[in-house]
Image: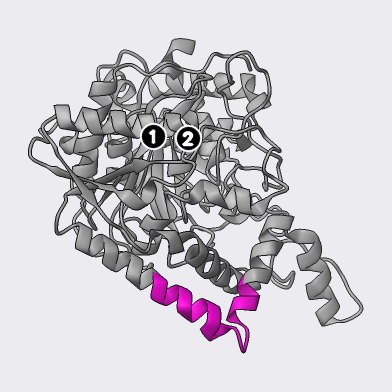
Amino acid sequence: MSGLTDLTLKAALDGLASKAFSSEEITRAHIAAIEAARALNAYVLETPEKAIEMARASDARRASGDAGALDGAPLGIKDLFCTEGVRSTACSNIIGNFVPTYESSVTTRLWRAGAVMLGKLNMDEFAMGSSNESSAFGPVTNPWRAKGSNRPLTPGGSSGGSAAAVAADLCLGATATDTGGSIRQPAGFTGTVGIKPTYGRCSRWGIVAFASSLDQAGPIAKTVEDAAILLTSMAGHDVKDSTSLSVDVPDFASFVGKDVKGLRIGIPGEYRLDGLQPEIAALWDQGVAWLKDAGCEIVDISLPHTKYALPAYYIIAPAEASSNLARYDGMRFGRREEGTNLTETYENTRASGFGAEVKRRILIGTYVLSAGYYDAYYLKALKVRRRIAEDFTAAFHKVDAILTPTAPSAAFPIGEKSDDPVAMYLNDVFTVTTNLAGLPGLSLPAGQSSDGLPLGLQLIGRPLDEGTLFSLAGAMEKARGVMARPDRWW
């Protein structure tokens, strides 16, 4: 049954529909794969009993002709999503062994569609990181290895567990979240497909908050079509989330394979950074060639405020984080460290409960919101954010989508950048702009580095135009051909 884990989500759903195998069979195959791959540290909590129970219920629904869109498909869930009766920690010590009495809206939609939960996936603490090294449960190891090296590599972050699990065939697909690139960058590092939809496309209710005006849920999957199938079930209006958009959810999979002839694709000059690695530049040129061959028109565009995006992001996101994380004080739930008075209890609890990266961002956020600095930093960053959004609005008068690299490099070794926060933050240089502007962005694997590691390209679209991204990504995926898979060393 091990071959069942190699299937794409679409192939697995077709197999389940034709009764080539049962949900219990494919679920057990994934459970065995997870147990054999614990060296990757992709899962922080395995739920095999719950998975088997859900699989058997799915098989019963299929037998009665009442199957949902994802019925019987085993998925992994990022530990940022609250799951009723199943520990949900955001991979932070301060939350402890919190077991929610409620289900996030996104996972509720997945279970309603018939999906099966294999467990909770590792991530950077509170989704703050680009390498999955800030997790209280330890780092995730990328299933890919560089040619001639056994050095462990990061899968990217913050959704490193989601990306590694999909790449290593430990689930058919996974939920993830993206605040500044946390779906797309790990997808690029692991040879998987990830999409951050338009802000408000997926409900944030029941997802542990990092930066509320930037956070957005989305899927990581093996193929463009798989990502489209998952997003269709994850998206939808939710009255419990005031930022959720009351718009119809199309069948995103129907866009995959559509003709893209005549679409105009923008190439922003500002993304050709000084010192851009030659193999990243060559990959970008290859993507342009694929789209030209598919009949697209290539248009040079300018996004003049791009150079201010990272500084603005690393003011706005920490500011919102400092506010959102104020609730973790040891009073109501989670970790509690006693002190001689209330203030000392707060201080001891937060000092021991938060990791170094989270503390750094809380301190930055508190500083930029403080009296005397609010106007100089936070207010100015909000003005820059508006300019960045206006740049995209102007560009989309000329083009239908934008093509850029996903990340400035391939996956790097664990520990290589953990002592240099600025170097780590630069991993998000191509992705933060879409979060600041609330736009959809999709990363797909497009090639390999000189040492055999996957490299991704990013497509950015108009608000609520994920369909065009799926069409373009499908055309690029077809032109690329079969992608290499990581050797199973674990």
Crowding at dot 1, Cα within 10 Å, few <14 / some 14-19 / many 20+, comes out as some
Mark 2 = which residue?
277
Magenta stretch encompasses residue 382:
yes
Q: Is residue 365 above or below residue 138?
A: below
Q: Position of residue 333 (x, y in %)?
A: 69, 65
Residue positioned 69% across, 38% down in the render: 416
Mark 2 residue type: Gln
Furthest residue to the bottom?
371
Q: CA distance from mark 1 to mark 2?
A: 6 Å
- Contact, CB < 8 Å: mark 1 with mark 2? yes
Tell whether 154 sits left or right of 67. right
Residue positioned 54% across, 69% down in the render: 315
- Note whether residue 482 is visible: yes
Q: Position of residue 413 (x, y in %)?
A: 65, 32
The image quarter in which residue 24 lies: top left
Q: Nearer the viewer, residue 205 or 487?
A: 487
Q: Regarding mark 2 in the picture, which secondary structure is present there?
A: loop
Mark 1 = which residue?
281
Q: Is residue 304 above or below residue 173?
A: below
Chief SS of the magenta region: helix
